Image (spheres, rainbow, N blue to C red):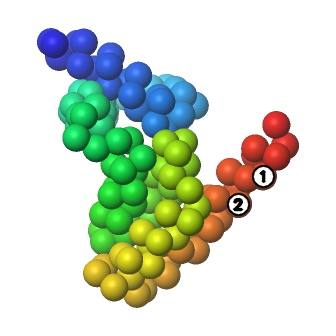
Amino acid sequence: MDEKERYQKGLQTRSEVLGKEHVDRAQANLTEFNAPFQELISRYAWGEIWDRTGLTRRERSLITLAMLVALNREPEFRMHVRAALNNGATTEEIREVLIHAGIYCGLPAANAAIQAAEQVIKEAKDRSSSS
């Protein structure tokens, strides 16, 4: 697969995991400065890593949440809570990952993640009940 095909496949996977609206927003915000970075993300993170067969997307989502707790990256964490729900992770699984992360990543980081995840989950439930 060449780079252009990997980029297109990455955009497709990114849309499936994060939602078409997210990808459309990212594409609409491309600039001469950030376009090469966005293309890199689509080709390698989404076109290579997220499409590997060794783990399911649900498993990758749960692992990603734990890593984002460790890195204390709340905006990315919130985005990946939505992705985890899209990928079939349950709220119970997300909660268990965050409790587990509390011991290995630190309680303050996990506490912030619990609060952020709870808000994202509530918003997702509100959206699904209104549609």
Residue 60 shows up from this direction: yes
On the image, which quarter does residue 100 sit in? bottom left
Residue at mark 1 to residue at mark 2: CA–CA distance: 6 Å
Relative to 130, residue 21 above or below: above
Relative to 78, residue 27 above or below: above
Quadrant of the frame with the N terminus: top left
Q: Residue at x 42, y 47 (%)?
A: 58
Q: Residue at x 75, y 46 (%)?
A: 127
On the image, which quarter does residue 14 sit in? top left
- Looking at numbered disc 1 in the image, what kind of residue is underneath it? Asp
Q: Name the residue tied to disc 2.
A: 122
Place of residue 35 in the rendered image (x, y in percent of width and height, measured from the top left):
30, 28
SS of the residue under disc 1 = helix
Q: Is residue 128 left or right of residue 30?
A: right
Q: Residue at x 64, y 59 (%)?
A: 121
Place of residue 110 in the rendered image (x, y in percent of width and height, measured from the top left):
43, 78
Q: Residues within 10 Å of mark 2 (few under 14, many from 20)?
A: few
- Looking at numbered disc 2 in the image, what kind of residue is underneath it? Lys
Q: Name the residue tied to disc 1.
A: 126
In contact (CB < 8 Å): disc 1 and disc 2: yes
Quadrant of the frame with the C terminus: top right
Q: Nearer the viewer, residue 38 or 66?
A: 66
SS of the residue under disc 2 = helix
